[in-house]
Image (spheres, helix red, strand yellow):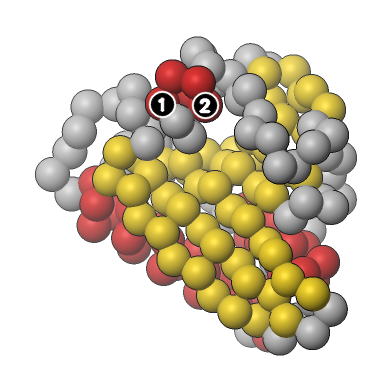
Amino acid sequence: MSSVRQDSATFTEPPEAVFRAALGVLQNAKGFTLLAAHNGGGRLVAREKAMMSNPKFFDIRIAGEAGASQLNVVVGTDPRTPKALMDGRANDKALKNYLASVRGALDGTSPAPATPVTDHFVQKKAEMPWSDPSQDTAIEVGGNLRAAYGL
């Protein structure tokens, strides 16, 4: 990924609720494609293709215990696209908008209902089971992104 931006947020809700909110935002927002999800491990990987911007990858991790949760989000531009002058600024804006949407989904101001998903990752166009969230997946979308670009 290029022009990487990252941020985190702390919530008082349990990790399962934060995961559902993060997943719901991805499923309900326009332009997002879910590439990997692990319910128990609190991991999500998604690709966003905005109208007038380079595609972005989101690596989302939720950790915590019953009383508090930590949401960590990393956003970077698809390295297969030509670099643009505004990539960093666009990634920063996408990151802030995503975090605000998750906050809104949790407090009810902008509901984002989540449809349950299985633990999986995408290889080409097939969903493969993802058993260990501590191991990075071999996501393939027109080439092995994790291996080639360190996603």
**Label 2 with label 1: CB-CB less than 8 Å:** yes
Q: Residue furthest front?
A: 134
Helix, strand or loop status at disc 2? helix
Where residue 94 appears, x then y in whole percent? 40, 58
Helix, strand or loop status at disc 1? helix
**Residue depicted at x 67% and y 62%:** 62
Where residue 77 appears, x then y in whole percent? 35, 39
Q: Amino acid at mark 1?
A: Tyr
Residue 91, relative to residue 93: is it above or below?
above
Name which quarter of the figure residue 22 lies in.
bottom right
Q: Residues within 10 Å of mark 2 (few under 14, many from 20)?
A: some
* Of 90 and 130, the residue lying toward us: 130
* Of 61 and 20, the residue lying toward us: 61
Marks 2 and 1, how far apart at CA: 6 Å
The residue wearing badge 2 is 146
Q: Amino acid at mark 2?
A: Arg
Instruction: Determine which of the numbered discs, if any, sits on residue 149 in the image.
Output: 1
Where residue 134 appears, x then y in whole percent? 71, 42
Name which quarter of the figure residue 2 lies in.
top left
**Residue depicted at x 66% and y 29%:** 137
**From where the camera sits, is residue 89 visible?**
yes
Residue 110, relative to residue 49: is it above or below?
below
